[in-house]
Image (cartoon, rainbow, N blue to C red):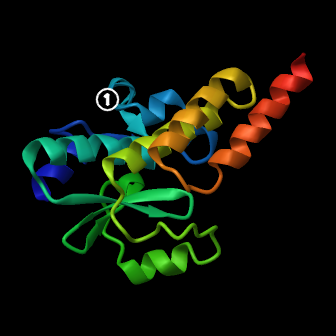
Amino acid sequence: LAALKNLLWSDSGWNLKFAGAGKAAVRRESVLPLRVLAKDSSGCLGLAWLAMMIAEKEKFPLEAVLLPGHVTLRYHGVYMEPNRGGYAYSEEEYKRKYAAGHWTGFEWTPLTRAQLLGLAAFNLGNAEKDRNPRIAVNWYELAEKLFPGYPGIRINKNFAKKKIKEVR
């Protein structure tokens, strides 16, 4: 655990910074792992994806866990906050912090690889939905295949399709 935290957040590792919330967190530079490394900053999802790639390669039992509008990391019950340099919140602290959030029913259980990639596709669709809705629809369709049942994908896909019709 210390080695992973050192790699991700220390001066002797990649020293990744928080890119910001909202639109900053869903840009390609904050989601796609190679772009995260190139920019030295990430949103919660991009850093979780990068950490999970490392964990999978090293056979390290790390989990990506969904919270309302957020992804965090968990190792044997110890949470690591991707946006705060691996700071360890307790589950109770997360429950209080996100109490008013939109709960989906997927929280607290480890995300599968497909679900994590589905969230990435969803975020990339969100980044495109206002300026390039056709590309957004493609991202949302991929997200639906990877993470069926995730609330918001269909809503945002329909919003993007409506924007395409408005442009015609």
In the image, residue 62 above or below residue 99: above
Q: Quadrant of residue 66?
A: bottom left
Compare residues 160 and 146 and report the one nearer the observer. Answer: 146
Q: Residue at x 38, y 56 (%)?
A: 84
Q: How dense is the environment of label 1, judged by Cα within 10 Å: few (below 14), some, or many (20 and up)? A: some
Query: Where, by quadrant of the figure, is residue 53 drawn?
Result: top left
Image point (53%, 74%), residue name: 97
- Rendered location of residue 125, percent (x, y): 60, 34
Count of numbered marks? 1
Q: Give the residue at mark 1.
A: 37
Q: Is any part of residue 18 visible from this angle?
A: no
Q: In which quadrant is the N terminus drawn? A: bottom left
Residue toward you, 86 or 106: 106
Q: Quadrant of residue 26?
A: top right
In the current view of this chain or complex, which residue is farthest to the bottom? 92
**Rendered location of residue 54, percent (x, y):** 18, 42
Q: Is residue 130 above or below residue 112?
A: above
Which residue is located at x 37 percent, y 69 percent? 109
Type of the residue with mark 1: Leu
Residue 43: image location, x then y, percent: 46, 44
Q: Residue sitting at 55 percent across and 72 percent down?
A: 98
136 relative to 5 in the view: left or right:
right
| Residue 105 visible to the viewer | yes
Instruction: Name the quarter where the C terminus is drawn.
Output: top right
- Classify mark 1: helix, strand or loop: helix
Residue situated in front as seen by the camera: 76 or 151? 151
